Image (cartoon, helix red, strand yellow):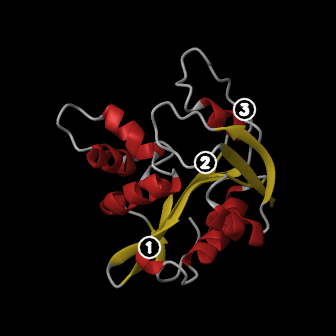
Amino acid sequence: MINLSPPFRPATADDADALATFINMAGEGLPFYLWSKMARPGEDPWAVGRRRAQRTEGGFSYKNAVVAEVDGRVAAGLIGYPLPETPEAIDRDATPPIFVPLLDLENLVPGTWYLNVMATDPDYRGQGYGARLLDIAEQLAAGSGSAGLSLIVLDANTGARRLYERAGYRRVADRPVVKDDWACRGENWVLLVKDA
């Protein structure tokens, strides 16, 4: 982990509630949709998201997260990690179709530092936290020796796409969104990359 200065700090397991919210925001509601399917009868889907964020392993672990804490509130955060050097084979028969386009795009950028989640609480938007988190992502990528950075964004999320493009990310591929019964406002997942 790099040396962070306030308001930024490494996330802890106690940040799981905010991280679950950011995961769902960045994922355009897909995480909540999936947590609803994973929840035990009568269980709040948000509890599933918090539990996943509290894990010490896995992509969505708090161990892969940086947050901005402002006045005692988690205002923004990112979750990212290096992708494997070799693309992982996708078992298309066993993988839920909703994931296939995302995995296809990830496999196009092996060895990059994958910015899986970046989001800002609506009360703190427009204050530069997103741009500063992108700078932190670059530092984390450089520290990991990754071959560059990558992220996936929904085509309909024009505000986020503008932020990423201003920061030097460029579009390299897209895949159609598989919606099942998930209500989604976009049509394509867009893979953006930035050279190291």
Would you name the residue on which mark 1 appears?
Answer: 122
Q: Is residue 138 visible?
A: yes
Tell me if mark 2 has few (under 14), some (14-19) or many (20+) residues whose alpha carbon lies within 10 angstroms of its own: some
The residues bearing labels 2 and 3 have C-alpha atoms spaced at a distance of 26 Å
Give yes or no for contact between labels 2 and 3 (Cβ–Cβ under 8 Å).
no
Query: What's under tag 1, amino acid-wise?
Result: Pro
Asked which secondary structure carries label 2, the reply is loop
Residue 186 is labelled as 2
Q: Can you tell which of label 3 and label 1 is closer to the viewer?
A: 1
Picture coordinates of residue 62 (x, y %)?
43, 55
The residues bearing labels 3 and 1 have C-alpha atoms spaced at a distance of 35 Å
The residues bearing labels 2 and 1 have C-alpha atoms spaced at a distance of 20 Å
Asked which secondary structure carries label 1, the reply is helix
Would you name the residue on which mark 3 appears?
Answer: 87
Residue 65 or 18: which is nearer the viewer? 18
Residue 165, image quadrant: bottom right
